[in-house]
Image (tube, rainbow, N blue to C red):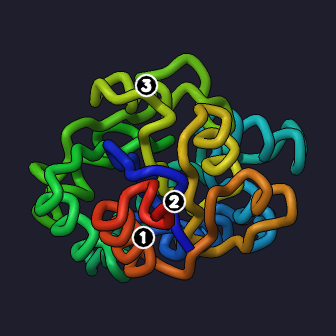
Amino acid sequence: MTLPRPPAAVIFDMDGLLFDSERLYGEAILTAAREVGCEMSHDVFLQLIGRSREVNHRFLIEHYGADYPLDALVAAWGRHFLALAAAGLPLKPGAAELLDLLDELGLPRAIATSSTHATVQRNLEALKLVDRFHGIIAHGDYASGKPSPDPFLKAAGRLGIAPELCLALEDSHNGVRSASAAGMMTVMVPDLIAPTEEIEGLCTLVVHDLHAVCRLVGLQRITGPTSSEP
C-alpha cells in the first residue's frame, strides 16, 4: 500500500479528520432539535457532513419544509456544540504523530475546511496547534465549497505547491469529491460515514486512521516512486 509519488505537501480536512468533532456535532444537533421542538434524525445529520453551511441550510429547508425553525436550531446547535467541545475536543488517533512526522520531513501543510476561521482558530488554540499549519483555508476563502475543488486548490495555492503533488486527507464523501476534483492524491480516513463504491473509486487509498497515513508518508519518503526498479 503506497502513494503514487512522494507528497510535497499535506492538506487536512478538519472536522472528523483532524479533530473528533463530527460526533459532537451530531450529539449537539439532536439535543438542539429537542430543545427547539423540531424534527431531526441522525441519518439527516449524516447528510450534512462535509458540505457548506449555505448548502446545508437549503437542504434542511427543502427536506423539512419552509416553516422549519432553522435559525433557532442553528443557534441552539452552536451553543450545545461549544458546551461539548469545552469539555475537551480530542484529536483523532495518529494526528499528533503525523504532525510530528511532517515537521521531521519538512513538509508544509494546510487545513481546507467548510468551517469558519473563528472555529478553526478556536480549535487549534485549544490544543496548541496554531503554529503547526502553514495555511488555513476556511469558509469565505473560496467561491464554492466542497464538493467543488475550490477549497483544496486554494490551499495548494496558499502553500505554493502543485495540486498533483499534494496529499489530501479527508473523512467525508464531499471532501473526497473535492480533493479528487482538485487532482490531488486523496486518502480517505472514514469517520462516521463509510466509503461507497463511488468514493473508493475517487480515492488513492482508504485507510483506517492517521497512524496508517504516518506509515504511508514515512515509507514513501524513504523509498520514493522508483523503489521497485532495479
The type of residue carrying mark 1 is Leu
Pick whichever, 142 or 184, lies toward us. 184
Residue 61 position by quadrant: top right
Q: Position of residue 130 (x, y in %)?
A: 14, 51
Q: Position of residue 142 (x, y in %)?
A: 49, 21
The answer to whether any part of residue 31 appears in the image is no
Horizontal side of residue 67 vs 138, given as left or right: right
Horizontal side of residue 225 vs 51, given as left or right: left
- Residue lying at 46% horizontally and 50% vertically, measured from the top left: 5
**Is tag 2's residue or tag 1's residue first in the polypeptide sequence?**
2
- Element at badge 2? loop
Q: Position of residue 189 (x, y in %)?
A: 55, 70
Residue of label 3 = 154
The type of residue carrying mark 2 is Leu
Other residues around mark 2 within 10 Å, as few (<14) / some (14–19) / many (≥20): some
Foreground mark, 1 or 3? Answer: 1
The answer to whether any part of residue 14 appears in the image is yes
**Residues at circles 1 and 3 in contact by the CB criterion of under 8 Å:** no
Give the distance between the C-alpha atoms of the residues marked 2 and 1, in whole angstroms: 7 Å
Q: How many marks?
A: 3
Q: Is residue 38 above or below residue 152?
A: below
**Is tag 1's residue or tag 3's residue first in the polypeptide sequence?**
3
- Residue lying at 59% horizontally and 32% vertically, measured from the top left: 182
Give the distance between the C-alpha atoms of the residues marked 3 and 2, in whole angstroms: 22 Å
Residue of label 1 = 216
Residue of label 2 = 3
The type of residue carrying mark 3 is Lys
Q: Is residue 67 above or below residue 222?
A: above
Q: Position of residue 185 (x, y in %)?
A: 54, 48
